[in-house]
Structures are given as C-alpha cells and as structure tokens.
C-alpha cells in the first residue's frame, strides 16, 4: 500500500504489503502461481467470485467466516426470510449491502487479546485484525497438528487449497511459510496466533517477540 493511502487510512507512515487481501493474490492462489490458459483463468475467477459472494451471504445471515460490524448490523437478515427470497430479491439485497459498507472478521476471543499482547511496532489496526482471525479458524477446526517429529501445525484457509505451515523452534520462535505475506512483513500473522493458541503457547510466543524487540533496541 502506498504511503499516502496508509496515512489516509490511519495506518501511519509505514509501507504495508497486504497481498493476502488483494484480488490478484487470491487469483494466484487459485491458479497455484502457475501460468494457465485463458479459459482456466476465467473459470478460476468465476469460482473466486462465487466464494466471495458466499462470504457476503454468510455475513448478512450472521453465519460463516465474516460478521457485520455493529454499524451495519441493521442489515442482518434471518435465514428463514432469506430462504423465501427469489434470486432477484437476493441480488437486490446484496447490492444494497455492497453500497452500504464493509464486513469485518469475528472479534477475537483468544486467551490473550491484542491489547494485552504487549507487541509494539505493528499498528493497532493491523494487530487487532491479526488477533481477530485465529479464533474463527479454531472454531472451524482448521488448525491441526502437522507432520510427525517436525513441530509443525497446519492452518487451512477457505481461500487456498494448500494450508499454511507453522513451525515451532526450540528457542520459542514460531514461523509461517513463505506464502504468508503478513509473516514476511512483520514476523507475525493470524496463522501463527492460531497455531500457538491451539498448542497452548500463545503466551510463550508473545514473550519471544518482546525479547526480540528488546534485543533490537
């Protein structure tokens, strides 16, 4: 994200790489970062649009991975009413929603909140979002133990056919794989937070981050 956009969004003077939220990154995941034919690309794009529409529908119905913010909670609709609507009525309602505002991830209920984490160097808006996603992944049982004897945890996402691999080290460090832009930028991501909460080591992870920050000072 360019500096003027960061400042306008209230994110400070930093340069942020948010490819995990960008459409082109999602398309790359769909094609597994490979060159594909135009027909295949169109099919993958169509599938991505359907998945995004499903997330939007889930937010409206107060189900699934996303939730409406309090500011837009008046746009929620009961599932029973939704089932009675025909396709044209549903499209009209979702279009109304798109014109009204965004959706946000379900609030975090991890054992430690982002305000209690003590992590500095990451803007609060970014950090709060990172802490908001893991609990939903845990609720959906998308966090599982990895391969035997290699101290890994697999974190599966709806937007990718391949799970992220989180690795634990003896010094208390946790790393995510090279395909995670959030980790590449700040050495912390929702996948690591989900994995450490799953293993009961979230507190240890945060202590390691504080130690690394102290050494850099």
Image: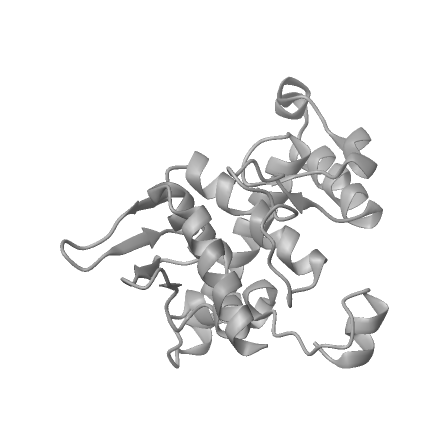
Instruction: In the displayed orientation, state which residue is furthest to the top.
Output: 80
Q: Residue at x 85, y 69 (%)?
A: 8
Q: Residue at x 37, y 38 (%)?
A: 141
Residue 186 lies, with reference to residue 163, above or below; the image says below
Q: Residue at x 68, y 46 (%)?
A: 104
The one nearer the camera, 127 or 82, is 127
Counting from the top left corner in percent of width and height, residue 204 is at 41, 51
The one nearer the camera, 207 or 24, is 207
Q: Residue at x 68, y 26 (%)?
A: 85
Instruction: In the displayed orientation, state which residue is furthest to the left.
Output: 149
Counting from the top left corner in percent of width and height, residue 48 is at 52, 58
Q: Quadrant of residue 1?
A: bottom right
Q: How many marks?
A: 0
Counting from the top left corner in percent of width and height, residue 77 is at 71, 26
The reply to whether residue 211 is visible in this rendering is yes
The reply to whether residue 191 is visible in this rendering is no
Query: In the visual, does 18 lie left or right of 4?
Result: left
Q: Quadrant of residue 143?
A: top left
The one nearer the camera, 10 or 38, is 10
Query: In the visual, does 97 lie left or right of 166?
Result: right
The image's colouring method is one colour
Q: Quadrant of residue 123?
A: bottom right
Q: Give the position of the C terminus as an image quadrant.
A: bottom right
Counting from the top left corner in percent of width and height, residue 23 is at 59, 67
């Amino acid at each position: 994200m360019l500096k003027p956009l960061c400042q306008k969004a209230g994110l400070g003077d930093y340069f942020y790489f948010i490819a995990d939220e960008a459409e082109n990154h999602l398309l790359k995941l769909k094609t597994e970062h490979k060159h594909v034919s135009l027909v295949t690309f169109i099919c993958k794009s169509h599938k991505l649009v359907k998945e995004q529409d499903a997330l939007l529908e889930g937010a409206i119905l107060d189900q699934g991975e996303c939730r409406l913010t309090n500011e837009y909670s008046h746009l929620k609709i009961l599932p029973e009413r939704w089932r009675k609507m025909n396709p044209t009525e549903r499209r009209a309602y979702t279009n109304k929603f798109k014109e009204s505002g965004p959706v946000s991830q379900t609030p975090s209920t991890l054992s430690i909140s982002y305000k209690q984490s003590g992590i500095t160097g990451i803007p609060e808006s970014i950090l709060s979002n990172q802490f908001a996603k893991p609990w939903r992944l845990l609720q959906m049982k998308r966090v599982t133990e990895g391969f035997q004897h290699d101290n890994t945890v697999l974190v599966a996402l709806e937007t990718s056919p391949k799970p992220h691999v989180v690795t634990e080290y003896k010094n208390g460090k946790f790393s995510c794989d090279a395909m995670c832009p959030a980790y590449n930028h700040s050495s912390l991501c929702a996948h690591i937070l989900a994995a450490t909460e799953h293993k009961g080591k979230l507190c240890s992870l945060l202590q390691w981050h504080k130690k690394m920050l102290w050494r850099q000072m």
